[in-house]
Image: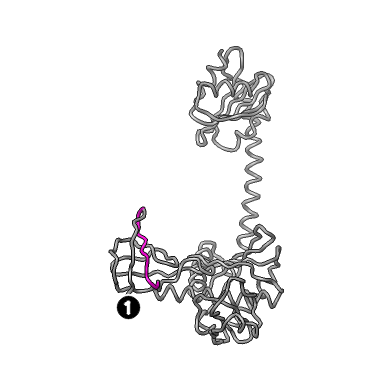
């Protein structure tokens, strides 16, 4: 810490303190879609930043203090921001797509493009062109001019009507030039890598493109590489055979589930025969009760004659009861149960479901009346 800031005023908030700073050197959060600075002022940590001051984790009295700005964070922000300029220019060159908005978060950055349903081929080409520009190690120039002076440049995005006074332009050779007040790297090679990680349609007929650049992209690659190697080891498959291996396993699992489903239904047929031989008799109603153990319970109602029997299936895990009957009104039964018990449920005259704090005995008591 070699430089000082002057704190003019401090206001306590819930668990932090807002310090108003004279000539605030900390870049504000959200300005131009960019993340703000972090760092320290004396013994206090800077949690967030605004145009006029910072949020601190500790109280400081008004006065002058040494401060330090997190340079690693600034470099990360610069990598993401210059990468955004390059990516936006790439989309415009390849498919005449305009960037409507840009937002940087702690995990990833996004740009919104003015078109829906952008093909994967376009995304790949934009990513490839961006990385070509990065690999060429082109100088990132700063040009300071005024509003009138910008007219001699072919800006990718027109100046806002709100812009006045000195204008800062960020120029990447003849590939891109845009007005911008944020952080940028000195050379495109400082970005190292850009990776599009997702694209989705958002409201307003836009496509949102998620990307990582620089250190973030390299970390993401490393993490995914470790995960793929781990999966490859578990599945005893080569990295480039993983897709076929997983597809084969999914098909095997699907076949297994289908076989189990058929076996469960077959088992339900024979189980129903056993259950109807020993029904519970409640007020002349023959009750077949079964505690769910597997998928067999899902097919029981098909094989119990619901004109003669009422089937009650309990699922202890989900704390639910399913009731099937054509000789009592299931809907009315559930409504009666609701009046005396803390439960939720509903259904039709022949089928209903209930969940909550209720036992089989509570259902049988209602049927006794």
Percent coordinates x, y for residue 87 in the rendering:
61, 75
Identify the residue at image location x=58%, y=26%: 312
Residue span colored magenta: 14-23
Q: Is mark 1 on a helix, strand or loop?
A: strand
Seen in the picture, residue 153 relative to 289 is either above or below; the reply is below
Percent coordinates x, y for residue 279 in the rendering:
58, 19
How dense is the environment of label 1, judged by Cα within 10 Å: few (below 14), some, or many (20 and up)?
Answer: few
- The answer to which of 83 and 18 lies nearer the viewer is 18
Q: Is residue 140 visible?
A: no
Q: Main secondary structure of the magenta part?
A: strand
For residue 330, what is the image quadrant? top right
Quadrant for the N terminus in the image = bottom left
Identify the residue at image location x=34%, y=74%: 68
Magenta-drawn stretch contains 9: no
Q: What residue does disc 1 label?
A: 3
For residue 351, what is the image quadrant? top right
Seen in the picture, residue 346 relative to 239 is either above or below; the reply is above
Q: Can residue 191 be seen in this view?
A: yes
Magenta-drawn stretch contains 18: yes
């Amino acid at each position: 810490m070699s430089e000082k800031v002057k704190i003019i005023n401090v206001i306590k908030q819930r668990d932090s303190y807002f310090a108003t700073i004279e000539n605030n050197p900390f870049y504000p959060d959200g300005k131009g879609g960019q993340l703000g600075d972090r760092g320290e002022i004396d013994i206090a940590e800077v949690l967030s930043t605004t145009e006029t001051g910072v949020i601190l984790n500790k109280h400081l009295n008004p006065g002058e203090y040494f401060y330090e700005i997190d340079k690693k964070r600034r470099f990360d922000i610069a990598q993401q921001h210059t990468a955004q300029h390059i990516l936006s220019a790439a989309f415009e060159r390849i498919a005449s797509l305009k960037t409507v908005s840009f937002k940087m978060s702690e995990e990833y950055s996004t740009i919104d493009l003015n078109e829906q349903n952008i093909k994967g081929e376009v995304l790949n080409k934009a990513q490839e062109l961006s990385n070509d520009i990065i690999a060429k190690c082109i100088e990132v120039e700063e040009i300071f001019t005024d509003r009138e002076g910008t007219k001699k440049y072919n800006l990718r995005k027109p100046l806002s009507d709100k812009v006045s006074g000195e204008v800062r332009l960020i120029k990447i050779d003849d590939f891109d030039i845009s007005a911008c007040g944020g952080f940028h790297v000195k050379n495109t090679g400082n970005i190292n890598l850009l990776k599009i990680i997702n694209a989705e349609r958002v409201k307003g007929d836009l496509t949102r493109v998620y990307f990582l650049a620089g250190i973030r992209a390299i970390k993401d690659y490393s993490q995914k590489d470790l995960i793929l190697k781990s999966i490859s080891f578990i599945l005893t498959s080569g990295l480039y055979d993983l897709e076929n291996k997983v597809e084969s396993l999914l098909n095997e699992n699907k076949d297994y589930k289908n076989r189990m489903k058929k076996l469960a239904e077959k088992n339900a047929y024979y189980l129903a025969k056993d259950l109807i031989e020993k029904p519970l008799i409640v007020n002349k109603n023959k009750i077949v009760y079964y505690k769910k153990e597997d998928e067999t319970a899902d097919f029981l109602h098909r094989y119990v004659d619901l004109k003669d029997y009422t089937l009650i299936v309990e699922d202890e895990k989900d704390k639910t009861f399913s009731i099937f009957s054509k000789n009592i009104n299931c809907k009315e039964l559930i409504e009666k149960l609701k009046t005396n018990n803390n439960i939720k449920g509903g259904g039709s005259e022949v089928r209903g479901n209930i969940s909550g704090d209720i036992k089989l005995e509570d259902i049988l008591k209602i049927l006794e009346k």
